[in-house]
Amino acid sequence: MTHRRGPDDEGRGLVSSSGAKIVEAHAADGCANCGVALRGAFCHGCGQSAHVHRSLAHLVEESLHGLLHFETKAWRTLPALLWRPGRLTRDYIDGQRARYVSPLALFLFMVFLMFFTFALTGGDAQTTREQAAAVPRMTSDAPITEERLHQGLLSISPLLARPALERRIVEAVRNPELMLHKMKAGAGKFAFLLVPISLPFLWLLFARRRGVALFDHAVFLLYSLAAMALLLSLAAVLGALGWEFLALLLVLFGPPRHIYVQLRDAYGLGPWSAGWRCVALLGVALLVLALYMLLVAAASL
């Protein structure tokens, strides 16, 4: 297809031989986004279109394009996350990223989906009531209990017995339902802490293995945590439908199988190397979960 200058002066840009306008902005004009001089239909600096539309129709079109583009990536990423997590991790580390949703975006979306599913299925509220019922309330012996609590905190650390902190702990013990509500509200906000808490432990498992960077571990953790959030969401749905046994099987056997396959394929490990690291990582997961809950509880006081 040949191109020629338009009938107006140079400020009108290029038109095709059929008269269709290609670039409306002058070639010397800077990109509206980054200021780089334009030399085509798209900015070679940031990739933005040279013509900036200002219409509601284009806004809808752009939104649909972004949504469908994300959906296309999601339909490629989710099956790989469940059935080929190691291959997905390895592809992303090796630079094959255009086909997949980024690990951070997927992690954040899955965490949101998990808490949304918990709220929707009602299992979260039932758990709160059961946990709150298991915590004894302070009644007429409140002064004695508070004194015992003070002595207990003092024996652990004098810092815990400071008046301001001790007062908050006493309030949490007196009103466990409010405390649990605060913890649930804060759990989603602090979910990102799971990655930096887990990263040193995963690094230790590969400390003597060359060619493995912290970036690789971060990608592994983000995809792994996203998968765990998805498995818990599916388990919550199964439980709400009355299939508690299937939900229990999914929670018990889903994470070990997923972690083993991801370790094996992402790091190119043999069965033995992947197996013992899987067992170690399951123990690390319990430790990280305990540390995470302590942080959430401390932030909720």
Image (cartoon, rainbow, N blue to C red):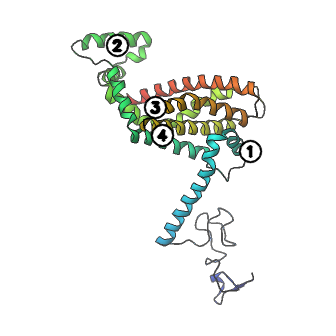
| Residue on which the image places disc 3 | 244
Where is residue 9, by image quadrant?
Answer: bottom right
Q: Nearer the viewer, residue 199 or 229?
A: 229
| Residue on which the image places disc 2 | 149
The amino acid marked with disc number 1 is: Asp
Horizontal side of 229 relative to 88 (left or right) equals left
Q: Residue furthest right?
A: 210
- Front tag of 2 and 4: 4
The amino acid marked with disc number 3 is: Glu
| Callout 3 secondary element | helix
In percent of the image, x 72 and y 33: which residue is there?
264
- Front tag of 4 and 1: 4
- Front tag of 3 and 1: 3
Question: Callout 3: few (<14), some (14-19), or many (20+) C-alpha neighbours within 10 Å?
Answer: some
Question: In whole angstroms, how far apart are the C-alphas of marks 2 and 4?
Answer: 35 Å
Question: In whole angstroms, how far apart are the C-alphas of marks 3 and 2?
Answer: 38 Å
Q: Position of residue 239 (x, y in %)?
A: 44, 35
Where is residue 3, by image quadrant?
Answer: bottom right
Question: Callout 1: few (<14), some (14-19), or many (20+) C-alpha neighbours within 10 Å?
Answer: few
Question: In whole angstroms, how far apart are the C-alphas of marks 4 and 3?
Answer: 17 Å
Q: Position of residue 272 (x, y in %)?
A: 74, 24
Q: Position of residue 1 (x, y in %)?
A: 74, 81
| Residue on which the image places disc 4 | 114
| Callout 4 secondary element | helix
| Callout 1 secondary element | loop
Viewport quadrant of the C terminus: top left
Question: In whole angstroms, how far apart are the C-alphas of marks 4 and 1?
Answer: 29 Å
Horizontal side of 288 relative to 88 (left or right) equals left
Assess whether mark 2 and mark 3 are in contact (beta carbons under 8 angstroms). no
In percent of the image, x 56 and y 71: which residue is there?
52
